[in-house]
Amino acid sequence: MKKNILFQEPYKSNKVKKYVNQSLNSNYYTADYFEDKCKDLLKNKFGLKNTFITHSATGALEMAALLTKENKKQKVYLPSYTFSSTANAFLRAGYDIEFLDINPDDLMINLDRVIKNAKNNILVPVHYGGYSVDMSGYKDFKKNGTIIEDAAQGIGTTWDNKQVGLFGSLSAISFHHTKNIQGGYAGLLTVNDSKYIEKAKFIYERGTDRSKVISGIKNKYEWVEIGSSFQVPDILSAIIYAQLEDYDQIIRKRKKIHNFYSSYFSKEELKNTLYVQKGPSLSTTNYHAFVLIFKNNTIAKKFIEFTKNEGVNCYIGYVPLHNSKKGKDLKLNSRLEITEKLSNRIVRLPVHTNIKNEDIKYIENTFNKFFKRMLNISI
Ligand SMILES: Cc1ncc(COP(=O)(O)O)c(C=O)c1O
């Protein structure tokens, strides 16, 4: 019987209802009870300190862009192979941006190429597909410039045994419903450089110094910064907390399907047809995604069409920003050879906690059928 295996399904924790009810019963929805619990867990389990739970990673990036903006010309280096939010945040805050090409194996930027341009500038490494950017050059860049990590997909991913999001002065993680930990729409700003902490509190709270009133330093708060409302109600933190508590279970489930794909796509018979995204050697994965790179655009397209018809929903990667409508309107065009060559060949496979053993069998049969019928490859 035909199945319908979704590309993405949010994880559902059994504890969500209990925590949400607890939050609702307090009748004080702006409380910080679950927010504080999330922050403690993020600190103890992932080493993420000085965190702000935001309405999205987009919001966290916007906060970061406001925090690092100075009264001089600053350029932001980021990949074009990323989500719109990475560019939006910096363009809205008035920066110039420049896109960087990606590596063909890990699909992420190479820090070495921009270290010489660090002075007064900002680098935004985007950790993609559950892997970390190769952060080898991060200390060199930080001598003269600032790093803001877009770790939207990276909760639990490490580079050299350290959680991504801890290398830059600031970083953003997403808890959007498509991510490993989800609160519907939610995110996290981490402030690693203490010089930004106070200002971050002001920006977070509509540009006011209300945080000083809360901590008893002042008795009346006022407008001190250009800020916005980036906070979330505590009910949302309750949802995130329930999932953070289940983190290991979530990883175990995602790993199972990831391991199946790894062994399937490492088969010798497929070597001439595609390869698998390979993270840098010091990077672990949080099993957020499984990314294939086909050697040919047409086969990648056919693979998506065929598997979709069979009920296995695979998906394309990002449309490079410099080639998107807005990128063209803003004349952000550059020549990014690898990004342009590979972006139409990237296919992401379904990875989520609701894929069962019988689904894995079904996915395997579907892939076998595709390779046999389309390419006459027997697996
Ligand atoms: C690289 C990257 N940055 C930022 C975002 C935005 O995250 P959010 O949906 O939490 O705003 C995403 C979303 O998928 C993303 O992939």
Image (cartoon, rainbow, N blue to C red):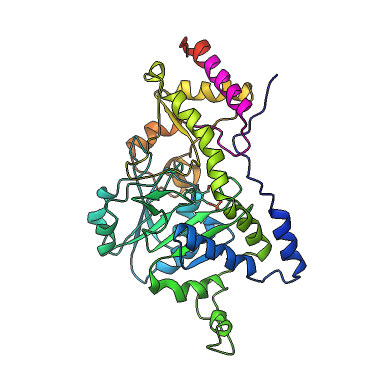
Q: Nearer the viewer, residue 202 or 44?
A: 44
Whole-percent x, y for residue 78 in the image: 38, 51
**Residue 376 visible in the shown view:** yes
Q: Decide: is 370 above or below 292.
A: above
Q: Residue furthest left?
A: 116
Whole-percent x, y for residue 46 in the image: 46, 57
Q: Decide: is 221 above or below 18.
A: below
Whole-percent x, y for residue 273 in the image: 40, 20
> Magenta residues: mostly which secondary structure?
helix
Residue at point 51% right, 74% down? 201
How many numbered badges does the structure rendering display?
Answer: 0
Task: Judge from the rendering whether residue 194 lies leftward or rightward of residue 214; answer left or right.
Answer: left
Residue at point 53% right, 34% down? 256
**Residue 126 visible in the shown view:** no
Q: Nearer the viewer, residue 342 or 330?
A: 342
Q: Nearer the viewer, residue 370 or 31?
A: 31
Task: Judge from the rendering whether residue 294 lies leftward or rightward of residue 358; answer left or right.
Answer: left
Whole-percent x, y for residue 56 in the image: 56, 57
Residue at point 46% right, 63% down? 190
Q: Residue furthest bottom?
A: 219
Q: Decide: is 279 above or below 367.
A: below
- Whether residue 184 appears in magenta in the rendering, the answer is no
Residue at point 74% right, 70% down? 26
Task: Judge from the rendering whether residue 133 lies leftward or rightward of residue 349; answer left or right.
Answer: left
Where's the N terminus, which quadrant?
top right
Q: Which residues are magenta?
A: 348-370
Q: Decide: is 161 above or below 263.
A: below
